[in-house]
């Protein structure tokens, strides 16, 4: 998805394809995890599970975020953001307060949810909490078996519980998911129960790549991998 474009093009797109949305409410789940509720005319938005909206975070920079909840009739939807470092996106999102207005694109992306798949396994980090929250209601409603694995900083280890997630396991963010041998020894790979599950991997690029490699050698399930960020690289 797009991460940068000239200012004049961004200005034209916003002017042509509004509407602008208003920050209705903000809540810090942890000092680094911020949930924001937006309000506006979202009647033409297509909220596909796991898809992402584009938010303009500076004159030329754009970032992608996954809506976690929406109500078309009330004109509201929510996004969970990871506030970290001094990046342009983090600074902008951290600064948003009730009453601020901004343009947010309609969610877009590939189809990640298939009602015919019986089991779902989702892996990620703080940037993937929104993805997990977007999946949770439909996974429960349709009777899927599901499991979430998160690698989180110490200060965010309680975020899944505070967000109401279920069937999750939290691991410290210590580089373990860059180790193929360590991953292959996880309980997930010591049983055939999850062999045909659908695996959705997101978050840190290196962790995603390593986990995907182990899965390809160990399971027959479908794998969807999307790195959200990489150390030293902007606008991934």
Image (tube, grey):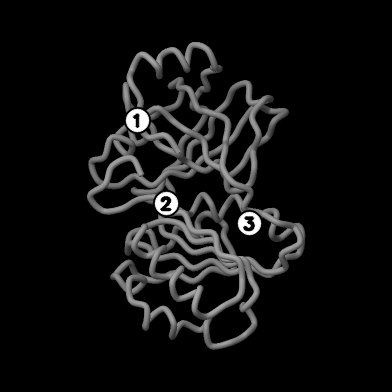
Q: Is residue 74 left or right of residue 8?
A: right
* CA neighbours of label 1 inside 10 A, class few (<14), some (14 to 19), many (20+): some
Residue 105 percent coordinates (x, y): 53, 28
> Residue drawn 52% across and 80% down?
218
Name the residue tied to disc 2: 127
Which of the 4 image quarters holds residue 5?
Answer: top left
| Element under disc 2 | helix
Location of the N terminus by quadrant is top left
Say above or below: 156 vs 48.
Answer: below
Could you say which is closer to the camera, residue 23 or residue 181? 181
Residue 63 percent coordinates (x, y): 40, 36
Residue 185 percent coordinates (x, y): 43, 85
Name the residue tied to disc 3: 136
Say above or below: 134 vs 142.
Answer: above
Name the residue tied to disc 1: 4
Mark 1 to mark 3 CA distance (whole Å): 31 Å
Q: Earlier in the sequence, mark 3 or mark 2?
A: 2
| Element under disc 3 | helix
């Amino acid at each position: 998805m797009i991460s940068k474009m000239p200012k004049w093009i961004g200005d034209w797109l916003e002017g042509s394809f509004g509407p602008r949305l208003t920050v209705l409410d903000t809540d810090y789940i942890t000092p680094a995890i911020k949930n924001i509720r937006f309000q506006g005319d979202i009647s033409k938005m297509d909220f596909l599970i796991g898809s992402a909206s584009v938010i303009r975070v500076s004159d030329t920079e754009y970032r992608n975020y996954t809506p976690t909840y929406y109500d078309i009739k009330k004109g509201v939807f929510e996004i969970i953001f990871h506030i970290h470092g001094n990046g342009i996106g983090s600074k902008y999102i951290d600064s948003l307060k009730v009453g601020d207005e901004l343009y947010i694109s309609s969610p877009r992306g590939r189809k990640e949810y298939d009602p015919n798949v019986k089991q779902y396994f989702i892996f990620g980090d703080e940037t993937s909490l929104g993805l997990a929250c977007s999946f949770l209601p439909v996974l429960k409603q349709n009777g899927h078996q599901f499991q979430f694995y998160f690698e989180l900083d110490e200060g965010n280890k309680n975020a899944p519980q505070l967000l109401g997630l279920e069937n999750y396991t939290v691991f410290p963010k210590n580089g373990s998911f860059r180790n193929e041998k360590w991953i292959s020894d996880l309980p997930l790979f010591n049983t055939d129960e999850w062999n045909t599950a659908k695996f959705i991997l997101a978050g840190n690029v290196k962790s995603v790549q390593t986990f995907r490699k182990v899965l390809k050698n160990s399971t027959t399930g479908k794998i969807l991998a999307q790195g959200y960020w990489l150390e030293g690289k902007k606008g991934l």
